[in-house]
């Protein structure tokens, strides 16, 4: 995945401005950052449903959102986006059909097993708990066997046991050569990623690895390391704004000097 | 084509799970025709004259209302956004919905025409043509609803699509006043509306006309169905703000 000069405008103001990013294939990449930092917008740009995107977003060597990519990319939205009035299997069968999976029954059974929803196959999604519903949504992204999985907060609302199991699944999918871009608020999950991207105010604050993160910040855990980075970035932004104002004030003096 | 069928079958599965909606779609037009039959109980010629129009009009309205929330529902559940990241084409989406609701419209046409006969409607023209036109009217309602649905951005907008799109047609279609007595501009305007042709075909059939007399009107209805599908596809956006 290669992103150059990405700019996204929402509601008349730039949400992301000048983002550059390279993500190698076959890794789990964590996308972290405070809410409103542009994580979902970036993910939507990568899967090609975000409007008003300028710059280059190349995914698996094709332009983001191009028809050829749609079979190769799986997207899980932040809120469970599945049909509440269908059963688990009916949902997955539909998404398998859309992805053109050669043996849908097998793919559906595998996806159900992966998200540990065995026994709920014939249940209507509306009758499931919130955590189960979000796992159906994850299974719907997995069922097509995509090369790139873009998962927007897939573990939110899940208990620690399920979170651990899902991260094991993510590692396994990456070991098969797939690329996963996973956003999360839970900082200890970040430590299980190969790469970490930290966003703040629509820009990339850090592009690092878990070990590097701890080493450079000297923080004892991921949570404090992130806070240190975010605070440092906020301070830099504030200082930058002051510098601009200072420049504006000194300009007339320079003019007179000349 | 496969994805159209997959989508149609998914929508039908959703409908199969929702018995009350199916009962309303099929039963509501029957109830309305029943009320009119009852009202004009001692003047059976009224039902003979207006019955065919109503078996076209009521299903069209019901289908329009149901499908006018379809896209909105997909948009708000987030499923539309997810679908737009899959290989499904916008045409598959609209045609899939159209096909699923056309299947339901077929059931509706048979039940509603059957019920109208039961409560005393006598059609001078051929009965199977009444069924065909009723089916086309219902499909027209579906596709107009889908086109309107793609335009609506909120529930408030979606519910107003019916009065906005169907009522003007209802007023000028010739049901309230024969079209040749209308102000010239309105008469001219009514020719641009599909409901005019639906009512015209049914009026002809009630008067005993045959296929040769209504095929022009039927052709126009079919064109409007295609036009509404194309409009629905064009107004759907893969990328959203």
Image: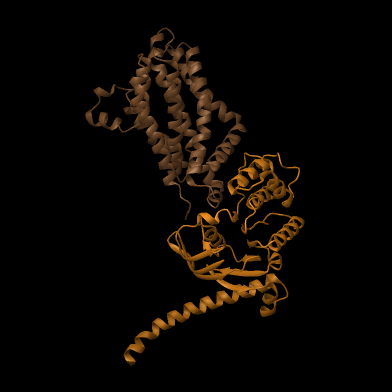
Residue B182, visible in the rendered structure? yes
Q: Is residue A205 above or below residue B106?
A: below
Residue found at the very far front of the displayed protein? A102
Residue found at the very far top of the displayed protein? B42
Which quadrant, please, contains the C terminus of chain A?
bottom left
Quadrant of residue B140 within the rendered picture: top left
Q: Colour of chain B?
A: brown
Structure colour scheme: by chain
Residue B139 % position (x, y): 45, 31
Tell which chain the image draws in orange.
A
Residue B220 % position (x, y): 35, 30
Residue B69, visible in the rendered structure? no
Relative to B101, B151 lies left or right? left
Residue B62 % position (x, y): 47, 29
Q: Nearer the viewer, residue A62 or A19?
A: A62
Residue found at the very far left of the displayed protein? B184
Q: Residue at x 46, y 57 (%)?
A: A51
Residue A131 % position (x, y): 69, 50
Task: Count every numbered label the image shows and give the total.
Answer: 0
Which quadrant, please, contains the N terminus of chain A?
bottom right
Q: Residue at x 48, y 18 (%)?
A: B113
Q: Is residue B233 above or below residue A56?
A: above
Q: Is residue A245 above or below residue B84?
A: below
């Amino acid at each position: 995945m290669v992103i150059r000069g990405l700019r996204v405008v929402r509601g008349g103001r730039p949400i992301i401005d000048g983002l550059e990013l390279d993500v190698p294939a076959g890794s789990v990449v964590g996308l972290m950052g405070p809410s409103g930092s542009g994580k979902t917008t970036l993910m939507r740009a990568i899967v090609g449903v975000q409007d008003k995107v300028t710059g280059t977003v190349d995914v698996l060597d094709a332009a983001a959102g191009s028809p050829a990519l749609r079979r190769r990319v799986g997207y899980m939205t932040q809120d469970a986006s599945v049909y509440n009035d269908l059963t688990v299997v009916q949902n997955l069968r539909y998404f398998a059909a859309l992805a053109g999976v050669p043996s849908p029954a097998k793919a559906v059974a595998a996806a159900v097993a992966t998200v540990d929803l065995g026994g709920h196959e014939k249940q209507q999604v509306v009758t499931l708990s919130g955590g189960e519903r979000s796992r159906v949504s994850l299974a719907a992204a997995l069922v097509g066997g995509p090369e790139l999985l873009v998962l927007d907060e897939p573990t939110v609302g899940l208990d620690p046991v399920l979170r651990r199991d899902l991260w094991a699944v993510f590692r396994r999918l990456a070991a098969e050569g797939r690329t996963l871009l996973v956003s999360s608020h839970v900082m200890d999950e970040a430590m299980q990623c190969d790469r970490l991207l930290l966003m703040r105010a629509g820009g990339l604050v850090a592009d690092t690895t878990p070990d590097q993160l701890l080493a450079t910040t000297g923080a004892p855990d991921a949570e404090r390391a992130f806070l240190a980075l975010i605070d440092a970035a906020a301070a830099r932004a504030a200082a930058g704004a002051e510098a601009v104002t200072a420049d504006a004030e000194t300009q007339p003096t320079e003019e007179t000097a000349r | 084509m496969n994805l159209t069928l997959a989508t149609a079958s998914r929508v039908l599965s959703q409908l199969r799970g929702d018995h009350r909606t199916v009962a309303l779609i099929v039963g509501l037009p029957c109830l309305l025709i029943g009320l009119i039959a009852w009202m004009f109980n001692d003047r059976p010629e009224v039902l003979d004259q207006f019955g065919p129009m109503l078996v076209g009009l009521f299903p069209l309205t019901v289908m329009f209302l149901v499908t006018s929330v379809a896209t909105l529902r997909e948009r708000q559940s987030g499923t539309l956004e997810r679908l737009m990241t899959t290989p499904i084409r916008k045409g598959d989406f609209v045609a899939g919905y159209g096909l699923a609701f056309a299947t339901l419209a077929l059931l509706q046409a048979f039940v509603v025409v059957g019920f109208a006969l039961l409560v005393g409607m006598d059609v001078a023209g051929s009965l199977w043509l009444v069924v065909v036109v009723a089916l086309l009217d219902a499909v027209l309602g579906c596709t107009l609803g889908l086109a309107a649905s793609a335009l609506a951005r909120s529930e408030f907008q979606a519910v107003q699509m019916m009065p906005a799109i169907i009522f003007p047609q209802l007023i000028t279609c010739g049901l309230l006043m024969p079209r040749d007595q209308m102000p010239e501009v309105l008469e001219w305007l009514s020719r641009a509306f599909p409901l005019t042709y639906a009512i015209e075909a049914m009026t002809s059939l009630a008067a005993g006309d045959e296929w040769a007399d209504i095929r022009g009107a039927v052709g126009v209805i079919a064109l409007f169905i295609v036009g509404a599908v194309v409009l629905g596809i064009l107004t759907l956006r893969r990328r959203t703000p």
